Image (tube, rainbow, N blue to C red):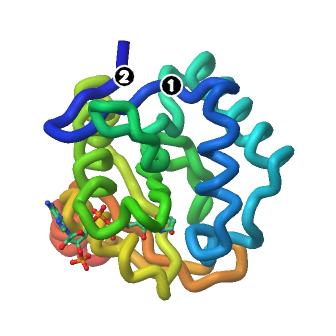
Amino acid sequence: MPVLTTERLRLDELTDDDLEDVAAVLGDPEVMRFYPAPLDRAGAQRWITRNRERYAELGFGLWAVRTHDGAFLGDCGLTVQHVGGRDEVEVGYHLRTAAQGHGYATEAARASVALAHERGIERVTAIVDADNLPSQRVALRTGLQLERVLDHAGRTTHLYATGAAAECASRVARGGR
Ligand SMILES: CC(C)(COP(=O)(O)OP(=O)(O)OC[C@H]1O[C@@H](n2cnc3c(N)ncnc32)[C@H](O)[C@@H]1OP(=O)(O)O)[C@@H](O)C(=O)NCCC(=O)NCCS
């Protein structure tokens, strides 16, 4: 049973059987150019294990993104990240390079955010490097808005959030506090 189904995609919990595919995507320097380093095979295995712990602890994590006929495209889903001094639910996505440019990340991210809302999680963020323009475009197309720019892990980072405009407006109404 997939966790989520969209028009073109299915999102499934990752298992150890996905190691080859995950290692290929997260071992690609191009996909990982905004991360400290690409993951080696052991790193990819730890990453799958970490997401399986998230499914058990939180009921969500990053899931495998596949076409309906089973082709592995990458991952997308929800995690909790500490950013700007607080824990935030973040929608994340990584696609193998050949799968980019088809709208798959946006389709998967929209479904992930909708699932978060269904589960009562109102606020979903995306924490994106200031230079990562493709990811910023995914965040915007997913309906998130730029809330603020901050330093995160030593990098200038954009924090996108659902409802950011409303939050901004209420901050203005409160006199900027
Ligand atoms: C971030 C990332 C997932 C974005 O991938 P992407 O393919 O650009 O995003 P989408 O899958 O939503 O595809 C959108 C693009 O496909 C195009 N497209 C083509 N056919 C489409 C269709 N049928 N439907 C929708 N969009 C389509 C869109 O025009 C858009 O192009 P544009 O951004 O140049 O305007 C990808 O760059 C990536 O994996 N990067 C490395 C990992 C990473 O940095 N992750 C984010 C960390 S914060």
Q: In this view, does 56 lie above or below 75?
A: above
Q: Residues within 10 Å of mark 2 (few under 14, many from 20)?
A: few
Tag 1 secondary structure = loop
- Dots 2, 1 in contact, CB < 8 A: yes
Horizontal and vertical percent position of residue 14: 56, 29
Residue at the image point whose x is 81% and y is 48% from the top: 41
Q: What is the spatial separation of the Cα atoms under label 2 and label 1, in whole angstroms?
A: 7 Å
* Residue 119 percent coordinates (x, y): 31, 24
Q: Quadrant of residue 34?
A: bottom right
Residue type pointed to by label 1: Glu
Q: Name the residue under label 1.
A: 13
Classify the position of ligand 1 by quadrant: top left, top right, bottom left or bottom right.
bottom left
For this rendering, which residue is in front, 157 or 72?
72
Of residues 116 and 71, which is closer to you in this image?
Answer: 71
Q: Name the residue under label 2.
A: 3
Residue 172 as seen in the image, left or right of residue 55: left
Q: Residue at x 53, y 42 (%)?
A: 79
The kind of residue tagged 2 is Val
Residue 90: image x %, image y %?
Answer: 46, 50
